[in-house]
Structures are given as structure tokens and as C-alpha cells.
């Protein structure tokens, strides 16, 4: 069994969609990034790659490569899953947290869990997604960005 940890952060900006866990969330701002900037999915990918000692998503999907401009992070997660599966690993569980002052994410959490579970070929009960505010503190509390962390166990 191996444990991996992932972290990602992106700035909120106007004229972008807000996508978290593969779910488009109605909001006046979205996350700025080379891909769709889905911080949750990025943190999950980094945790999986880290558990296998395969580097991170920047190594696998560099922001200097135009092939990944605007990329759907759920599709990138499918690629990461293929890599770890072909190396003989299976996902046991993932525990993740999104730090976001607004919008409220609770109505979208189960869809995020389902999207991630489907890609990783595991039961939804193996995927935890939590959301928290930071009580107005820091860049996430000020509404400047959103961050996410993920811990995974693979076997």
C-alpha cells in the first residue's frame, strides 16, 4: 500500500467557467489556468502520481504544451489512472478538501465524488470530497482563489 498527497491552487478570474471535480458550478468567476483549472481533480491526480513516485501533473501535462490548453481535467485524470493501473496499482480511497469562500459547494459534492469514482473505477464510497471556507482568511477567504488538497491510498 502507498499513500500520496496532492495540492493545487488557482486564481479566480472573470470570463472563465468554474469547474470542480468535473462539475460546472454556476458562479460569476472561474479558475484561471492553462487547462480548465479544476483544482480538485488536479490535487487528486497529484496525490495518485505522488503515491507511485511518478512526479506531478506539471511533469505529465506541462502548461507549455498547447495540447493541454483548455484541457478537461477529468480526461487528464483518466490518463493518470491508466498510468497507475498499467503499473499494477488500484485506488483504495481518496480523501480531499476544497478551500473556497464562495460559492457554496455542498449541492455539487456528490456529483464530484461520482465523477472521480467513475474515472478511477471504484465505488463512490471510496471517494471523499469536503468543502470548507477559511473564515475570510488568506487568499481563499478573500475570494481571490480556490485551493484543494487530496490524500490517496493505493494498493
Image (cartoon, rainbow, N blue to C red):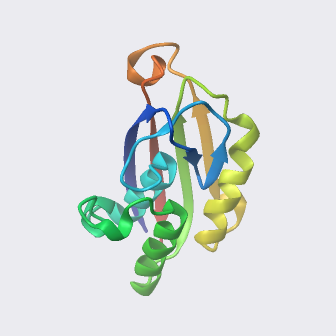
Identify the residue at the far top of this view.
136
Can residue 53 be seen in the rendering of this structure?
no
Residue at (43% x, 68% y) in the render: 1
Q: Position of residue 151 (x, y in %)?
A: 46, 51
Q: Position of residue 94 (x, y in %)?
A: 54, 56
| The one of 1 and 83 positioned closer to us in this rendering | 83
Quarter-of-image position of residue 57:
bottom left
Q: Is residue 109 above or below residue 121?
A: above
Of the pair 52 and 58, the residue shown nearer to us: 58
Say which of 80 and 126 sits in front.
Answer: 80
User: Position of 9 compared to 95: left or right?
Assistant: left
Tell me residue 21's x, y (percent). Answer: 59, 52
Q: Is residue 132 left or right of residue 138?
A: right
Q: Quadrant of residue 92?
A: bottom right
**Image check: 18 left or right of 7?**
right
Looking at the rendered structure, the number of numbered marks drawn on it comes to 0
Which residue is located at x 38 percent, y 18 percent? 138
Question: How far across and how far down the image is residue 17, in percent?
Answer: 56, 44
Can I make out residue 13 in this image? yes
In the image shown, does 19 or 107 lie closer to the viewer?
19
Q: Residue furthest front?
A: 15
Amino acid at each position: 500500500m502507498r499513500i500520496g498527497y496532492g495540492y493545487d491552487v488557482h486564481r479566480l478570474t472573470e470570463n472563465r467557467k468554474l469547474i470542480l471535480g468535473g462539475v460546472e458550478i454556476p458562479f460569476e468567476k472561474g479558475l484561471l489556468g492553462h487547462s480548465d483549472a479544476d483544482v480538485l481533480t488536479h490535487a487528486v491526480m497529484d496525490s495518485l502520481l505522488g503515491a507511485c513516485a511518478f512526479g506531478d501533473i506539471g511533469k505529465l501535462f506541462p502548461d507549455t504544451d498547447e495540447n493541454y490548453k483548455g484541457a478537461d481535467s477529468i480526461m487528464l485524470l483518466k490518463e493518470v489512472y491508466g498510468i497507475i493501473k498499467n503499473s499494477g496499482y488500484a485506488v483504495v480511497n481518496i480523501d480531499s478538501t476544497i478551500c473556497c469562500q464562495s460559492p457554496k459547494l455542498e449541492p455539487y459534492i456528490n456529483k464530484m465524488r461520482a465523477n472521480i469514482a467513475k474515472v478511477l473505477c471504484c465505488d463512490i464510497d471510496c471517494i471523499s470530497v469536503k468543502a470548507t471556507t477559511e473564515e475570510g482568511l488568506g487568499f481563499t477567504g478573500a475570494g481571490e482563489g480556490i485551493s484543494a488538497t487530496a490524500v490517496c491510498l493505493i494498493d
